[in-house]
Image (tube, rainbow, N blue to C red):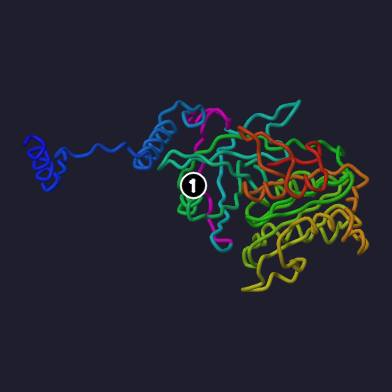
């Protein structure tokens, strides 16, 4: 009887459907890190901006003085003399500093080195940017700047809006590079249109430039090259622009072209454009090369023998010939261009190692200077 009852109970138990009970409390999910990334970025940006605007910086807190001499330690009010259109998105801006505020000449060393710049302050947003006076400063306190307006360039757009009679504050001079007579056989100045440029030969100076990056070389041309008849250094300028219309204005190019034509042993001028669209360059200028400034342009500029046999190119590594004299490359321009030609700057705008085109060609830090 007991056995029969147990079997019946088991059958009844098996026939009852099983029911699962679930908690009505919501499940707790582990927090996803990706949900907090935008918040973290926004917080970091806020901290960075706060640090920039509120951290005490000597340059931004420099006082303005209408009586102290022109100095890197204080801003000096200047007056706009003219602000004329010189090309697509560029203007020639002329300022005047009260002559009595010019630094007194030093018998040992002039505060105005052959290449120097000033910081101009945008009063609206309290931001300063460096600019190089094309012809330095004359005895009347006049300075001429070639200013390009960029879509995201606050100070450049602000300067383009200035009219004669308005006031602009600047501080300086700040030495960019110190020239030493006959230290180099050739100086090559390199600066292209936001891309890559080259340089040139012994006791020679080469500069590669592009756009408004030509201003340091023109300042050196105005203060040293065009005035020193005994200088033995040969100078080369490799300059690149987007189109012929974007080349520097006649105020700059006419003087360079005329001097290069009359003194081919002192100055060589090579122009490059990314496109020939638009108007043709003036007939008095050298015909621009089409394309970017790169390794081939540097080698041709220096007169290096780059021809190698078919078999060496296919199965071996050709040796790069080197100039026989002392060559210095001055490279200036936007960071991407400087990196492509000479490698990036180091920390805190130090020179950093030589890379890019010049590093590949074997030039060292003693032969390359990034402006």
Rendered-image quadrant of the N terminus = top left
In x, y percent, where is residue 83? 53, 55
Residue at (72% x, 57% y) in the render: 239
Quadrant in the picture for residue 53: top left
Quadrant in the picture for residue 328: top right
Q: State left or right for residue 265 relative to residue 219.
A: right
Specify start and end residues of the magenta stretch as a single range: 62-86
Local packing at callout 1 (Cα closer than 10 Å; few below 14, some 14-19, many 20+) is many
Which residue is more in the foreground, 196 or 155?
196
In x, y percent, where is residue 214? 68, 52
The residue to which callout 1 is attached is 155
In x, y percent, where is residue 351? 69, 36
Residue at (34% x, 42% y) in the render: 35
Residue at (85% x, 58% y) in the render: 300
Is 105 located above or below residue 335 in the figure? above
The stretch drawn in magenta includes residue 319: no
Instruction: Give the tally of numbered discs.
Output: 1
Rendered-image quadrant of the C terminus = top right
In x, y percent, where is residue 61? 46, 28
Secondary-structure class at tag 1 = helix
């Amino acid at each position: 009887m007991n056995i029969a009852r147990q079997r019946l109970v088991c059958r009844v138990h098996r026939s009852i459907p099983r029911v699962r009970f679930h908690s009505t409390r919501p499940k707790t999910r582990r927090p996803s890190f990706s949900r907090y990334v935008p918040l973290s970025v926004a917080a970091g940006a806020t901290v960075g901006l706060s640090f920039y605007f509120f951290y005490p910086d000597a340059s931004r807190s420099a006082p303005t003085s209408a009586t102290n001499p022109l100095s890197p330690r204080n801003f000096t009010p200047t007056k706009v003399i003219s602000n004329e259109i010189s090309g697509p998105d560029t203007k020639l801006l002329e300022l005047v500093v009260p002559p009595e505020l010019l630094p007194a000449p030093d018998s040992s060393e002039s505060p105005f080195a052959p290449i120097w710049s000033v910081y101009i302050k945008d009063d609206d947003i309290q931001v300063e940017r460096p600019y190089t006076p094309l012809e330095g400063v004359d005895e009347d306190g006049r300075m001429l700047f070639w200013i390009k307006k960029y879509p995201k360039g606050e100070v450049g757009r602000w300067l383009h809006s200035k009219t004669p009679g308005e006031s602009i504050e600047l501080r300086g001079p700040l030495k960019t590079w110190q020239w030493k007579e006959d230290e180099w056989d050739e100086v090559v100045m390199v600066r292209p249109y936001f891309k890559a440029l080259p340089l040139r030969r012994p006791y020679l100076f080469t500069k590669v430039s592009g756009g408004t990056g030509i201003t340091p070389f023109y300042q050196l041309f105005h203060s040293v090259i065009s005035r020193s008849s005994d200088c033995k250094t040969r100078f080369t300028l490799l300059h690149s622009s987007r189109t012929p219309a974007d080349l520097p204005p006649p105020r700059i190019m006419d003087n360079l072209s005329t001097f290069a034509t009359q003194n081919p042993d002192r100055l060589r001028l090579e122009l490059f454009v990314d496109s020939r669209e638009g108007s043709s360059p003036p007939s008095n200028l050298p015909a621009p090369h089409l394309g970017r400034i790169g390794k081939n342009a540097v080698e041709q500029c220096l007169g290096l023998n780059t021809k190698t046999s078919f078999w060496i190119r296919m199965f071996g590594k050709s040796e790069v010939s080197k100039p026989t004299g002392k060559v210095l490359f001055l490279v200036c321009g936007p960071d991407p261009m400087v990196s492509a030609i000479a490698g990036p700057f180091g920390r805190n705008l130090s020179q950093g190692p030589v890379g890019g085109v010049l590093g590949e060609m074997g030039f060292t830090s003693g032969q390359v200077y990034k402006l």
